[in-house]
Image: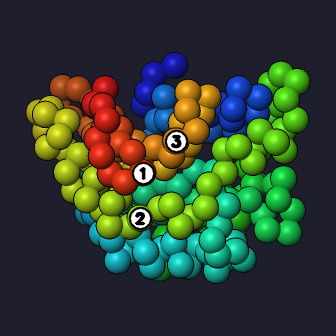
Amino acid sequence: MSRRSSIATLTLSLAVTLSGCSAIGSVTNPTADASTTAKADLFTAPAIDQAIQALAKKVGASPMKVLEFNVYSNLISVEAADPAKPNEVNKFTYRDGSVEDPQPVKLTTTGSKDPSAALKENLFDSTEIKPEVLAKLLAEAAAASKIEGAKTGGLLVKRDLPFSNDIQILVNVDGTRADKQVRATVDGKITEIV
């Protein structure tokens, strides 16, 4: 499966998989086109912070228990545990200044591990998401990729399970002749470019 595939799988601690994300951590915006990629309204720290506040209000938890956090030029989304039903995850999307109705996220078991325990291993507090760090990475990823015609496509924040318990930031960069992914720690230190 390619990194740019719109259908992929995120492994939740080798035991639970979440439909819709790849093991590499592809950041694909299926609704983006040339005009939205060029317009980076949500790639700023104030915009990301405003979206986090609106998302937390809609989720009904502050901090949110986050499985995955995505930033694109035209939307910001979070997959967060339902505070009333902590074994259920919903996807909330912030677009045009408001949060859309939540969509359920399917979690499936692969192996004998308890799905709720595997989910808990993958969740992290939304306080770990630093808007200024994300904005800096979004601004610097294209140049860091060193590819021709580089444009930042989007960003994903999630745990690096099953490889480590660390939270990682993955920034996809689209180029004229190649695509790259800039990987960083939660504090914004670039660890690799693949």
Give how far across and how far down residue 46 sits, in percent: 34, 77
2 or 1: tag closer to the N-terminus: 2
Q: CA distance from mark 3 to mark 2?
A: 15 Å
Which residue sits at x=51%, y=72%? 52
Q: CA distance from mark 1 to mark 3?
A: 8 Å
In the displayed structure, does residue 154 sit left or right of residue 127? left
Helix, strand or loop at mark 2: loop
Give how far across and how far down residue 107 sits, in percent: 78, 41
Q: Is residue 9 visible?
A: no
Helix, strand or loop at mark 3: loop
Above or below 34: residue 136: below
The residue that disc 2 covers is 130
In the displayed structure, does residue 90 sit left or right of residue 69? right
Q: In this orientation, which residue lies closer to the viewer: 53 or 40?
A: 53
Q: Quadrant of residue 3?
A: top left
In the displayed structure, does residue 86 sit left or right of residue 188? right
The residue that disc 1 covers is 186
Q: Residues within 10 Å of mark 2 (few under 14, many from 20)?
A: some
3 or 2: tag closer to the N-terminus: 2
The amino acid on which the numbered mark 2 sits, given as a three-letter code, is Lys
Q: Quadrant of residue 185?
A: top left
Q: Residues within 10 Å of mark 1 (few under 14, many from 20)?
A: many
Above or below 99: residue 111: above
Which residue sits at x=41%, y=64%? 130
The residue that disc 3 covers is 166
Q: Are marks 2 and 1 in contact (CB under 8 Å)?
A: yes
Give how far across and how far down residue 141 sits, in percent: 23, 46
Q: Are marks 1 and 3 in contact (CB under 8 Å)?
A: yes
